[in-house]
Image (cartoon, grey):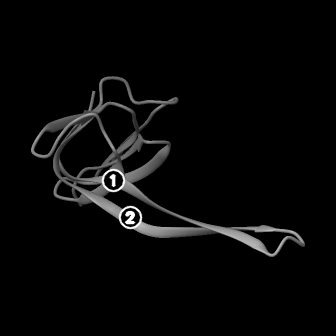
Amino acid sequence: MSTQAVIRTGGKQAIVAPGDVIEVELLSATSGDEVMFDDVLMIVDGKDSKIGAPRVDGAAVTAKILKEVKGEKLRTVFFRHRKDSMTTKGHRQKYHQVEITGITAG
């Protein structure tokens, strides 16, 4: 079993291991850049595990940004009661697709 970590980014948590490709909220970087997630909540390495309170001190996960992708289209419909009127709006969230390159335990 390889090293795994639980990271928090964009208000969401993800379980990652080296080589994984995940989608995260847009970051302030461009394609090809290396990013570091230092908000590591837990690290598991075989039978050894470190649980943060709330974070593991000195732990970090490095990743490479592959590309920017768009999520699924969401549609909302707003009805006006007894007015024979409605408005339809759509939204597609943008994400960064990142590949996990390494996990360092503190």
Residue at image position (44%, 30%) is 55
In the image, farthest residue toward the bottom: 84
Q: Which residue is mark 2?
A: 71
At mark 1, the secondary structure is strand
How packed is label 1: few (under 14 Cα within 10 Å), some, or many (20 or more)?
A: some
Residue 75, position as x, y percentages in the image:
56, 70
Q: In this rendering, would 101 be left or right of 23? A: left
In the image, farthest residue toward the left: 32
Looking at the rendered structure, the kind of residue marked 2 is Gly
Residue at image position (87%, 69%) is 81
Q: Quadrant of residue 78?
A: bottom right
Residues at discs 1 and 2 in contact (Cβ within 8 Å): yes
Residue at image position (45%, 48%) is 13
Sequence order check, earlier mark of 1 and 2: 2
Residue 69, position as x, y percentages in the image:
27, 59
Residue at image position (37%, 24%) is 57
Q: In this rendering, would 16 be left or right of 98? A: right
79 shown above or below 2: below
Q: Which mark is residue 61?
A: none
Q: Quadrant of residue 26?
A: top left
In the image, farthest residue toward the right: 82
- Quarter of the image for the C terminus: give it: top left
Looking at the rendered structure, the kind of residue marked 1 is Tyr
Q: Nearer the viewer, residue 46 or 56?
A: 56
- Quarter of the image for the N terminus: give it: bottom left
Q: Nearer the viewer, residue 33 or 5?
A: 33
Q: Nearer the viewer, residue 16 or 79?
A: 79
Q: In this rendering, would 99 be left or right of 73? A: left
Residue 77, position as x, y percentages in the image:
67, 69
Q: Nearer the viewer, residue 102 or 98?
A: 98
Q: Which residue is mark 1?
A: 95
